[in-house]
Amino acid sequence: MKRLFLILSILCMLGLSAEAEEFRILTTFYPMYILTQNVAGGIDGVTVSNMAEQTVGCLHDYTLQTRDMVMLEEADALVINGGGMEQVMDRVASTQAGLPVIDASQGIEMQASIEEGLLNAHVWLDPQMAIVQVKNIAEGLAGADPAHADRYREQAEAYIGRLRDLDAEMAEALTPLAGKEIITFHEAFNYLAQRYGLVVAGVIANEPGEEPSTRQIAETCDLVSRLGIGTLFTEPQYPQTAAKIISGETGASIYVLDPCVSGSGLPESYEQIQRENARILREALLSD
Ligand SMILES: [Zn+2]
């Protein structure tokens, strides 16, 4: 009761009022926000908001902010990536018992993470898996909000058509590179690589946001030399410090791949980022 009062006070302070008819969809982080926007955006009486700020990046070590708790209280459905990406979910589940949670990765088999006991949950970077996620989101929303079920399914179909085009384009661009070994910043690109025949030979950091140890940097240098790898891929959300050291030691050049965990917020931003990723991979690996 005390907590409810606190939250109502915060709402009043923010000048928000509860509109009963609106169906409020909350997403946990950027890729879920973009996929969900394409399924549920532009429908009267439906809103889509993102919990983590668009600049947060992957949610690995994310802790819930006051702002998130307010949004959770208001939400009618929560869309998560699943597979353990949202480590905050334990806390969400304990405080928001009645909130319908839509797991976008339902039915997708995930690989083990480098980090023991965890799964590699970066499935959205494989466009075909993103299509499965879009279907899951649409079906989940249709169940939670039957009044708009047809619209969710219609918009999902249209978006899936665009994602199929994207997949075909990326396959065409990357097929000539099949078998190439790459080193990425963290284990975000394994599913994308697997889809198009690239091989992730190693990662610079086990955990994004944590600088790799001197020993791990030395091991990556050895790997780069041993495999004759000419390129390191960093990510725009994280510092290039370790990559620069490895580059200095080995002569490998640095390119940036974007795991699509931040961006413009536009519905087409996933496709834009992925087209750019394909272009960068070609530029880096064709000259490799
Ligand atoms: Zn990540």
Image: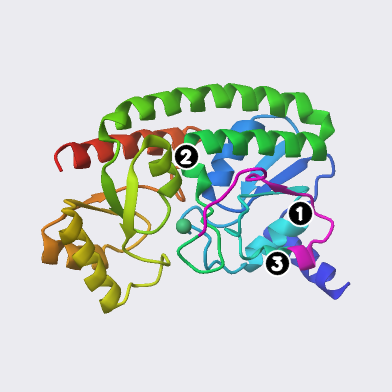
Q: Which residue is mark 1?
A: 74
- Residue 234 in sight here: no
Disc 3 or 1, which lies upstream in sequence? 1
- Give residue 117's mark: none
Residue at the farthest right position? 1
- Element at badge 1? helix
Q: Is residue 154 above or below residue 82?
A: above
Q: CA distance from mark 2 to mark 1?
A: 32 Å
Name the residue carrying label 3.
Answer: 90
Q: Is residue 120 magenta?
A: no
User: Local crowd at mark 1 within 10 Å, few (<14), some, or many (≥20)?
Assistant: some
* In the image: residue 149, left or right of residue 247: right
Nearer-N-terminus badge (2/1): 1
SS for tag 3?
helix
Q: Nearer the viewer, residue 192 or 142?
A: 192
Tag 2 or tag 3, which sits nearer the N-term? 3
Query: Viewer-nearest of labels 2 and 1?
Result: 2
Q: Residue at 33% across / 46% down in the picture?
A: 199
The residue located at (61%, 44%) in the rendering is 108
Viewer-side residue, 127 vs 256:
127
Tell me the kind of residue under disc 1. Answer: Glu
Question: Assess mark 3: CB under 8 A from ligand 1?
Answer: no
- Nearest the viewer among 209 and 73 is 209
In the rendering, at what x and y percent does residue 220 appear? 25, 65
Amino acid carrying label 2: it is Asp
- At horizontal 62% and vertical 67% (from top left) the residue drawn is 64
Q: Which residue is mark 2?
A: 126
- Which quadrant holds the N terminus? bottom right
**Magenta stretch: helix, strand or loop mostly:** loop
Q: Find the magenta span and give its range.
A: 93-112
Dots 3 and 1: beta carbons under 8 Å?
no
